Amino acid sequence: MSANMSDLGLPPDSAFALQELLTATDVVPRSMPPSFYTHPDLHKIETEQLFVNGWVCVGRLDEVPKIGDYYTLEIFSEPLIVTRSDEHVVQVLSNVCRHRGSQILQGKGNSKRFTCPYHRWSYALDGSLLSAPLVDKSPGFDKQQCQLPSFKTHTWMGWLFVNLSGKAEGFEIQTAGLNQYVENYHAEEMRSIGASTENWPLNWKCLAENFMEGYHLTPVHRDTLHPMTPTRLCKKIPGGEGYTGYKSHYNDSFSGRVQVHPDMTEEEKSMSMMVWVYPGFVAAISPNSSVYMSITPTGSTGLQTRWDVIARDAVFESGEAEERLEFARAFNKEDRERLLDVQAGLASRFASRGFLAPPDLEGTVWDFYQYMAKAFIK
Ligand code: FES
Ligand SMILES: [Fe+2]
């Protein structure tokens, strides 16, 4: 192992496995060592390098349809406000008061201004300070220094992404080559059915990898997803710099869905396009509804997932929206049970690296390892 690898603080066996990926020829595709999913030092490195410096999905534009609509969320302990400050502008602001640090808002709602509950400083929808009772008479008080930080955003098919450090490479650069697989689904015309936030005692990579490999569909989702999208019909697409994906084809009985966008090809109508935009956005984009998760780490064996099902108007009109959400809850529960077992297994002193299934089934996991190797091995 070279000196700069240990400087990054990666566990040595994970560092070795990642370096081997980049430098050796004929590497046999195997899973990463257990330390990759358990080591406490990785949490901080990943949070800063991948998430704070990368693009993280915070929800959908249609969750704030009217001016003044807002909701709050926390990603990697950073309290945020998502708000529509103007008809055409959705902003992500810090939810930390510039006076003495109180959180300003909770939950969601609609407001003309955001007022801190502690000493009643109030902010405009764009984060600028409107009033600071009595402090405005203090010597040296400068309103201009009291603007809530506003972060860099990018909208992709109705999903809102944020980059907290302002240092991420352009979203379009990261996802170059991906749009051809997803654009005909017109996810920007879909609407949120109901976002939820959950915390799971699990490493974030276990859930993201699981969402994005089709190998487990048949064994784990025997009565839910398998009848529709069995393992044997999965077909990987080539991964790019900042993404990977696969086509999850439907059994014949599920093809030819109605109420879809006219741009869609026959193949697209009979499959879900599974996409992973690194680090933590995963989605199953389907003809008239889609399931997505924004997965963020909370610790070495803790994650947050903010997830939702979004759907075309026709799904709401036909009264099926709640059913779609229930279906997603059912297969998420199946994944959760299995993955908590995996996390326990990875802590075993006898856990080892495993051989991966062929690319159509677990090639997305292999692509993700390449991304991790490029991010961490200099
Ligand atoms: S902390 Fe917000 S007004 Fe004092
Ligand atoms: Fe699953």
Image (spheres, grey):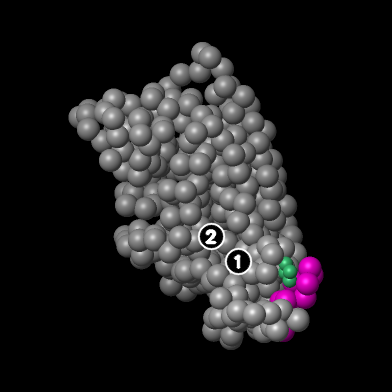
Tell me: 374 left or right of 121: left
Q: Is residue 346 above or below residue 369?
A: above
Question: Residue drawn 56% across and 53% down?
Answer: 294
On whether residue 115 falls in the magenta region, the answer is yes
Q: Which residue is mark 1?
A: 94
Q: Where does the magenta region start and end? A: 111-121
The residue lying toward the viewer, choosing from 335 and 302, is: 302
Inter-mark Cα distance, 2 to 1: 15 Å
Is 5 contained in the magenta span?
no
List the residue tagged with mark 2. Answer: 57
Mark 2 or mark 1: whose residue is earlier in sequence: 2
Where residue 18 appears, as percent x and y from the top left, is 34, 32
Callout 2 crowding tier (Cα within 10 Å): few <14, some 14–19, many ≥20: many
Q: Determine whether label 2 and label 1 are within 8 Å by CB.
A: no
Queried on whether the Cβ of the residue with tag 2 lies below 8 angstroms from ligand 2, the answer reads no
Say left or right for 363 vs 149.
left
Residue depicted at 47% across the width and 74% down the height = 262
